[in-house]
Image (cartoon, grey):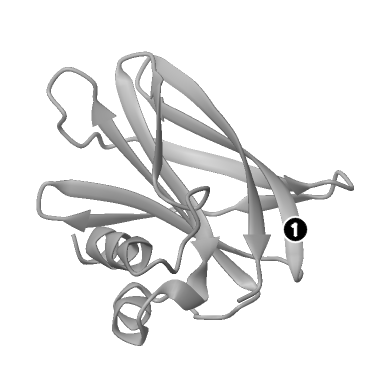
Amino acid sequence: MKLLKALCFAWLLGALTPAQAEQMKQLGDWDVHYIALTSSFLTPEVARAYGIQRSKYSALVNISVLDSATKEAQKVLVTGSATDLMGRAKPLEFKEINEGKAIYYIATMGFRYEEDMRFEINISNGNQRQTLRFNQKLYAE
């Protein structure tokens, strides 16, 4: 919950643009919540707690998967990549964070000053597989 609270707090303070605020897509039986933002928006305490380096040239990708019916967090496998406009793909290595009943999958990646990125996130659990695709412009703040 600390990570989610930190992201919500940054959004309330106006540090995030509406495009950077948490977003959600329903994929099959899942509600997939996602956000990509510059890691410097995290407080030093939150970054330290999760082993995230704060930098204006580092982005944090946060994925949370809930069962659409029960709204319970789902334990899944998350893999993916981010591709820039030149077609250069950056693999994302997600790590699982458990905070009580909440489960988050986070990855970090470097980027240049102002970069449009296409994210392709693969989510699987047993026989269910879904792909989340979204675009995000990342800014060095």
- Image quadrant for the C terminus? bottom right
- Asked if residue 60 can be seen in this view, the reply is no
Check the image and report above or below for 28 versus 54.
above
User: Which residue position holds label 1?
Assistant: 115
Residue extending furthest right?
86
Check the image and report above or below for 124 versus 111.
above
- Image quadrant for the N terminus? bottom left
Check the image and report above or below for 6 versus 69.
below
What is the x, y in percent for residue 71?
Answer: 16, 29
- Asked if residue 82 can be seen in this view, the reply is yes
- Residue at the spot 34% in from the left edge and 35% down from the top edge: 76
Of residues 75 and 116, which is closer to you in this image? 116
- Residue at the spot 21% in from the left edge and 66% down from the top edge: 2
Q: Disc count in the image? A: 1
What is the x, y in percent for residue 31?
Answer: 32, 27
Residue extending furthest bottom?
44
- Residue at the spot 65% in from the left edge and 75% down from the top edge: 57
**Quick one: label 1, few (<14), some, or many (20+) residues within 10 Å?**
some
SS at mark 1 in the image: strand
Q: Is residue 21 left or right of residue 109?
A: left
What is the x, y in percent for residue 62?
Answer: 42, 52
What is the x, y in percent for residue 32?
Answer: 37, 32
Which amino acid lies under the numbered mark 1 shown in the image of this protein? Answer: Glu
| Quarter of the figure with residue 10 | bottom left
Q: Is residue 86 left or right of residue 125?
A: right
